[in-house]
Image: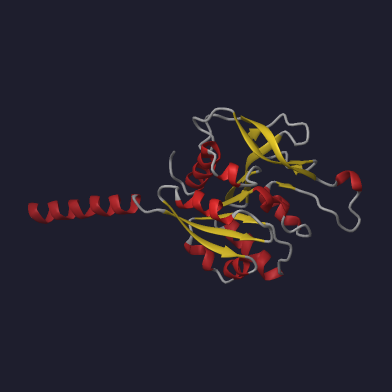
Amino acid sequence: MQKRYLLTLIAFFFAVFCLSGKPVRVMLVTGGHNFDSLSFFQMFEEMEDIEYEHFVQPHANAVIKNGDAEKFDILVFYDMWKDISEAEKKAYIDLTTKGKPFLFLHHSFCSYQQWEDFEKIVGGKYVQKGKNVPEDELSTYRHDVWIDISVSDADHPVTRGMKDFWLFDEVYGNYRVSSSVKPLLKTDHPESEPVIGWENHFNASIIIYLQPGHGPQTYRSEDYRKLVSNAIRYLAGIQN
């Protein structure tokens, strides 16, 4: 009896150890915008305990529509896509009702200009030219600038232990940010909105948006890598 109990106890702790050691399964979505793919994917490959599978639009949305995104712990978006069907919209909403976490990076913020719920999911909107869009409501951008980034909440899991830092990146300006988001990152750059990173909630999902992420210098930045890695682990329910 004691031997059987001991074997059961060993099996239990072995199972717990194996489960806790599983990598975070990431569905990584790109498409619709050029980027330095070599250094971008290297960033993810060098993150410990994170395992990603890459999907390019429009195939990524087909995978989401078919329900195959369910097997991933978190969806990370680095796409900039325009077209989305009603069935694909429903699939995104269904994922949020189930609490699937999303991480949006940089230009993914500009996707789906005609889909109102996308702004609610991300927590803001980059406004592009379109029918009946006033000129003064258009968002702006500028490449290759130094951005001073301040940590708004040093106790939040995404930014915990981080200090203010600089990135040579791209700024967006005149975009909308929901009043309900929790700011994580801010900047004083004159061509940027003050809040450049936040946590949002939509249905049962937690969503993180990080505005920086334009090129190789950012992908190689230890501060940026820590932000992305922390965000993935936080959204996957892992304590940093």
- In this rendered view, identify the residue nearer to me: 67 or 44: 44
Image quarter for residue 239? top left
Report the quarter where the N terminus lies: bottom left
Is 7 positioned to the left or the right of 238 in the image? left
Is 152 positioned to the left or the right of 226 in the image? right
Looking at the picture, how far across and down is residue 12, in whole percent? 24, 53
- In this rendered view, identify the residue nearer to me: 47 or 111: 47
Residue under the point 54% across and 51% down: 39
Looking at the picture, how far across and down is residue 123, in whole percent? 69, 46
Is 166 positioned to the left or the right of 237 in the image? right
Image height of 180 relative to 120, above or below: above
Report the quarter where the C terminus lies: top left
- In this rendered view, identify the residue nearer to me: 202 or 19: 19
- Could you tell me how many numbered marks the image carries? 0
Residue under the point 53% across and 62% down: 54
Image height of 226 relative to 15, above or below: above
Residue under the point 64% across and 54% down: 35
Decide if residue 101 is in sight here. no
Image quarter for residue 131? bottom right
